[in-house]
Every structure is written in structure tokens, then in C-alpha cells.
Image (cartoon, rainbow, N blue to C red):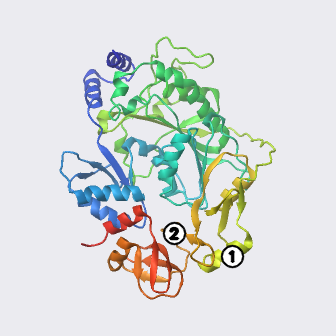
Amino acid sequence: MSKIEFIEYYSKNLNLPEEEFKRFIEVLETPLPHSFRIINTPFYEKVKMHIDSMPSVKRIDYIKDTYFIDKSVEESDKNKNFIINQTLLGTIQRQEIVSMIPILLMGLKEKHYVLDLCAAPGSKTKQILNIVGKEGLIVANDASSKRINILMTETFKIPHESFLVTQHDASKFPSIKMTEDRKFDRVLCDVPCSSDGTIRKNPCLLTEWNAKKAQGLFDLQYRILKRSIDLVEDDGIIIYSTCSLNPLENECVVQNIVLNENLEIVDPFTYIDNDVVSKDFFIKRGLKKWDVGEFKHKSLSVSPTTKEIHLDRCLRIYPHDFNTGGFFITLLRKKNKNTVEYKKTTPKPLFKDVSQEESYKILENYELNKNINLVRRYKANNIIYRVSEEVKHIIHNNRLKIVYFGYKFFEKCNINETGFRVKNILYEKDIKIDLEVELDSIKPALESKTLEMDFPKKSVIIKITDLGVCISGYSTGKKIMLYVCNNLQKALLDFTTQ
């Protein structure tokens, strides 16, 4: 019965010709191809070279560095393991094609401050981390503890000192006091939704479909979008997106926010980088008419407006157009000027700076820049985090439920004079190199995690020259014990010649 309801509901709402609607339904009942993108890391060239040689992998023409996996083509175990290992390390990101699009339309710059209000499971956050630099700021928020654990598992793969993970109800996200009187340049509202655009991945959504699921989320979606207005800079951009096909969750939410607040819908191609994503990918525009049945809301209109608010600037992506899932995206610009009053609160002392003496001792040992900000949790001295100036200011001056910040830089140990070893150094650029090697020359050492050689007894930073990455270890005088996690070990061994 649910499939019949689905067809009846969308045949009158999607404004598709009869033959195209039939194709839409047919494609909706086929499996979704697996897709992934190559992330910009020092491993990029080698990963790309290997991926391009795999028979089962097909490049996607309309989005840079993005691929489908053709399940009908037999692939070697070596290549299958390559995909798994590189995904675990974070040089490859498995992600639905349509899920990549919102970030590509945001016009992100290196110094932007970006808030991802409903961030889990983290694939979009990782896209942001790849673009925004340490002079910017990325705050990833989610209300669910379970989903935040997934978010952190993913984002740990991209060390970033100007990164925060918080746990708040997105519709009540607190204003953040920053070093300057400013807000976020971009806010992403990828809101909870009925998810019927993901039916190809979750077929049960079709057999269990009913209109009430979207109706139950409509109010929350509006409240999250409304809250984002106070968090974004004047003239800043809010991205509203869902993986739903339902106009109630999409155009109807956008219509209400534009009519009630001083926002405007922005042409989706305003910030597009044609070298990254082709305009040819986008075919369908937002709906101007819909019928959501007898559903009513206590204060918001669910009927189409007669006013011209440019709903045709919204984007709809349908499964049958490019063999993807379904998605909805809108860019909104904040026009009005308002000020945010910060509540005068005294944050609980959850974090503390590493003492000047201890910091100097550690940084001196590794010959690191003495201006690096090192912070630890009050009740956990075994990990030291590296953070930016902005993150340091935020964690000391705001009462936020902070789950994670910066990245883990040092870990307590008892094998050197500082009492700490470098934990995360893979992409470091401002650290003294003790030893340079080529990858193939240390293959046995990577396998055993021990490099047999005479070397002064000390902490050691080793640069793998042909990859441009660093690993750390400790020399006992006769051998160097390598600090290489299993995921990194497997990924590095992928690149060694047989």
C-alpha cells in the first residue's frame, strides 16, 4: 500500500511528464551505485593513479575526483583492499554523489568560519575540512551522541587545529563568542528529513512510506533553518538541504522562511567552480506548486504562495537524471542586520592550556614552532590537543557542550624525556626532520613497525620523501620503534612496490 501512496503523492507533486515519472519510479527501485571521491592529501597523486587503473572504477565526468564502482566488473582482492585501506586512512571518502553537492555550491574560502548544524555522519564536514584552512573555523554539531561518535570517527582522519565538535539541539544552537564580534560566513542546515530520496539505498523506505513522516519533521526543519539566521553574518550564506523529495520538507520550508524573515534565495550557480562541478549536472529547479493534502500547521502556511520569491532557484536532483539518489538544495542570503546578545556566563573549567614550562619542553624536544597552541582536558592529562587561536578562545570563553576540539597532537608515554610522543604528525609541515627515507626502503620496517639502524637515542621524525608525509618514532640507539597505527600501516604498504 505504501508504494501506491508514494506514487499517488509524487505523481501530482513532482511536475514530471508521465513517461519521465515512470522512469523515475523504475530507477528508484534499482540499487544505488557505490560512489567515492579522492581527498586532497599528500597521497592524492598515488591514490588517483591506482584508482584510474582499476577495471571496476568509472570516473564521474561532472564532479572532479569522483568515481562509481561498477559491481558487475570483477576486481582483484588487492584492489578491493586498496579501497578499504585508503578509506580507513581517509584518503578516499565513500559518499553519495548528491551528498557532495551542497558543499560545492557554498563558495567556501580558506578563511571562512563555517557551522555545520546537523553534521553527522560527517562526510560533508570532511569536505569542509578539506577547503577551510587553519585561519578559518569549522564547527560541526549534532544532537545525537550515537551519530556524533560516527562523525568523530570520520573527521579524525583529517587533522585540523581550527575544528570543534559540539552536541546541541540544532534549533537551539547557542551563539558563540569569538575573538572578534563576528558570526559564521556559512551555515549548513542539512536537516533531519524523511529521507525518501535515499530509497535506492534503503528500499524499506518505499514499502513503509507515508506522508506523516514528513509532516512530523516540518516544524523542526523550519526551526533549525530559522535558528541559522542569527548565527550567520550579514550577507552570509545559509545552505538548506535534505535527502527528501517532499515539497513539504523542501520548498514549503524555504517559502515560509523567506516570507517571514529577511532572506533571499540565491541563484545556485553564484559560487560554483566549473573546474570542480559541471553546471550540466543540475537539471531540475524548485517547485512552485504542490499539494500536501489535508495537513495543516498551527502557524506556518503549507500552501504555495502567489508571491514571486524565486523558488525556481532551488535545486532538485532526481535519481533517474544521473543515476544517483534524490536531493534538494537551496542557497539563502541573509539581508537584515541584527546583533546577537551573548549571555554573560562563566564557563565551567573543562579545558586548560598546557603550562608554559611543559609546552616549551615538549616543543623544544621536537623542535616545533613555539607559537603552537596546546590544550588538554582538565580531567584527562594523557592527551594534548593542538588548536588554533580561535578554538582556544572559544573553549575558554563559551559554555558549549564540546565533544572534541583541534586534533590529538601528543600522547603520554614513558619512553622519552618529555613524557609525550607525537600522535598525529602525518601532514605536519613545520617540524624538524631527523631522517629522510624512500617508502620502498622501509617496507620491512613498516611491516614490523621497527627500523633496525643505529641512531641517537631520542624521539625521531621520519619523512617519507616520495610521499611527502612524516611518521614519528623513538630511537633506542640500535633501532627505531615506529609510531604507526594499523590503518596508516596498511595504507602506506599499498604504495610499496612488490
With respect to residue 108, does 481 lie above or below? below
**Is label 1 in a helix, a strand or a loop?**
helix
- In the rendered image, residue 388, in percent from the top left (x then y), is placed at 64, 62
Name the foreground residue: 331 vs 376: 376
Q: In this view, does 422 lie to the left or right of 443?
A: right
- In the rendered image, residue 95, in percent from the top left (x then y), is placed at 39, 46
Kindly identify the residue that appears in the image at 22 percent across and 52 percent down. Answer: 56
Q: Quarter-wise, where is residue 101 in the image?
A: top left
Kindly identify the residue that appears in the image at 30 percent across and 72 percent down. Answer: 496
- In the rendered image, residue 46, in percent from the top left (x then y), is placed at 33, 67
Hey, what amino acid is under mark 2?
Ile
Kindly identify the residue that appears in the image at 41 percent across and 63 percent down. Answer: 486
Name the foreground residue: 168 vs 265: 168
Q: Name the residue under label 1.
A: 360
Mark 1 crowd level (few <14, some 14–19, many ≥20, 10 Å Cα) = some
With respect to residue 277, does 208 lie above or below? above
Q: In this view, does 426 lie to the left or right of 417?
A: left
